[in-house]
């Protein structure tokens, strides 16, 4: 798994997230509607969608732990798969992040794993 993630580019990471999150089809994170969802350009290279039901736009990151993060998905994924075997310092080095940023990343991921 680790090797696969390292070989992915950001776009492929996004597709992976879409597959996992929307395995039963795209749904609106605002109103949970699965109907009347149309593609609407791109936001920061992410496919943007508009829900005609509630008129909100969203991407696959909306409503997830990734949603307000400037950190690329690939780094998140690497952090997730590194959690068990690496220290936060190792993860920070691996991802080229400051310790503090890596610490917050790990904290957020642990929070999702627990909830
Ligand atoms: Zn909606």
Image (cartoon, rainbow, N blue to C red):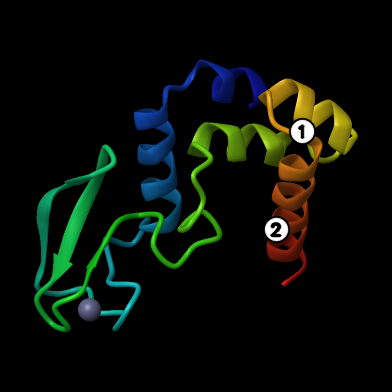
Q: Earlier in the sequence, mark 1 or mark 2?
A: 1
**In this image, 6 relative to 22: left or right?**
right
Query: Residue 102: horizontal and vertical position, in percent?
Result: 74, 41
Query: Considering only vertical position in the picture, is 40 above or below 47?
Result: below
Query: Residue 78: horizontal and vertical position, in percent?
Result: 65, 32
Question: Residue shown at 41%/55% (left/top)?
Answer: 61
**In this image, 56 relative to 10: left or right?**
left
**In this image, 62 relative to 96: left or right?**
left
Work out whether residue 34 or residue 107 is closer to the camera in this orientation and state it.
Answer: 107
Which corner quadrant holds the C terminus? bottom right
**Ligand 1: which quarter?**
bottom left
Which corner quadrant holds the N terminus? top right
Query: Residue 40: horizontal and vertical position, in percent?
Result: 10, 54
Q: Does dot 2 land on a helix, a strand or a loop?
A: helix
- Mark 1 nearby-residue class (10 Å; few <14, some 14–19, many ≥20): some
What residue did someone put label 1 on? 82
What residue did someone put label 2 on? 108
Q: CA distance from mark 1 to mark 2?
A: 14 Å
Work out whether residue 23 or residue 66 is closer to the camera in this orientation and state it.
Answer: 66
Instruction: Kindly indicate the quadrant of the structure image that contains residue 44.
Output: top left
Instruction: Kindly indicate the quadrant of the structure image that contains residue 36.
Output: bottom left
- Mark 2 nearby-residue class (10 Å; few <14, some 14–19, many ≥20): few
Query: Considering only vertical position in the picture, is 25 above or below 52?
Result: above
Q: Which mark is residue 104?
A: none
Work out whether residue 1 or residue 56 is closer to the camera in this orientation and state it.
Answer: 56
Query: Residue 48: horizontal and vertical position, in percent?
Result: 20, 53
Work out whether residue 101 or residue 107 is closer to the camera in this orientation and state it.
Answer: 101
Q: Does dot 1 land on a helix, a strand or a loop?
A: helix
Question: Residue shown at 15%/66% (left/top)?
Answer: 50
């Amino acid at each position: 798994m680790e090797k696969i993630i390292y070989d992915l580019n950001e776009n492929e990471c996004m597709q992976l997230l879409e597959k996992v999150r929307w395995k039963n089809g795209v749904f609106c994170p605002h109103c949970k509607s699965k109907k009347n969802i149309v593609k609407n350009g791109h936001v920061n290279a992410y496919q943007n969608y508009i829900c005609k039901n509630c008129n909100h736009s969203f991407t696959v990151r909306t409503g997830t732990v990734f949603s307000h993060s400037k950190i690329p998905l690939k780094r998140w994924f690497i952090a997730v798969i590194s959690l068990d075997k690496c220290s936060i310092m190792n993860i920070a080095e691996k991802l080229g992040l400051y310790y503090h940023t890596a610490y917050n990343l790990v904290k957020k991921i642990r929070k999702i794993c627990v909830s």
